[in-house]
Image: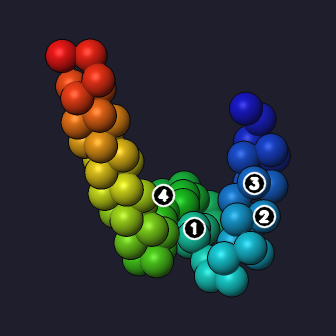
Amino acid sequence: MTYRKAWGQIKAMEGQLGLPLVEKQAGGPGGGGARLTPEARNLLSKYFRLVQGIEEEVNRRFRGIFL
């Protein structure tokens, strides 16, 4: 994925969610950078919990059907 496309998708998500996901720092002597906002970290935490729950349910149903 290109840099431009990635930033476009981030901006689209920020617009849909109504909150910032990435904090940018302009370049300088140490160079620039970007980091996730606390809100983005919170969303990722919730997403990983959701995925874990889905995996647990799929495994439970698989065992019930096939084992």
Relative horizontal placement of residue 61, taking residue 15 as reference (left or right): left
Inter-mark Cα distance, 1 to 3: 12 Å
User: Which of the image's four quarters has the C terminus?
Assistant: top left
Name the residue type under label 1.
Val
Q: Residues within 10 Å of mark 4 (few under 14, many from 20)?
A: few
User: Which of the image's four quarters has the N terminus?
Assistant: top right
Name the residue type under label 3.
Gln
The colour scheme applied to this rendered structure is rainbow
Q: Is residue 51 above or below residue 30?
A: above
Please give the label number shown on residue 62.
Answer: none
Contact, CB < 8 Å: mark 3 with mark 2? yes
Which residue is the site of mark 2?
12
Which residue is the site of mark 4?
30
Q: Earlier in the sequence, mark 1 or mark 3?
A: 3
Residue 44 in the image: state x and y as whole percent: 42, 60
Q: Is residue 3 above or below residue 20?
A: above
Contact, CB < 8 Å: mark 2 with mark 1? no
Inter-mark Cα distance, 3 to 2: 5 Å
Q: Earlier in the sequence, mark 2 or mark 4?
A: 2
Q: Is residue 20 visible?
A: yes
Q: Between residue 26 and residue 56, name the one nearer to us.
A: 56
Which residue is the site of mark 1?
22
Q: Is residue 25 visible?
A: no
Q: Earlier in the sequence, mark 3 or mark 4?
A: 3
Question: Mark 3, mark 4: which one is toward the viewer?
Answer: 3
Question: Mark 2, mark 1: which one is toward the viewer?
Answer: 2
Please give the label number shown on residue 9.
Answer: 3
Q: Residues within 10 Å of mark 3 (few under 14, many from 20)?
A: few
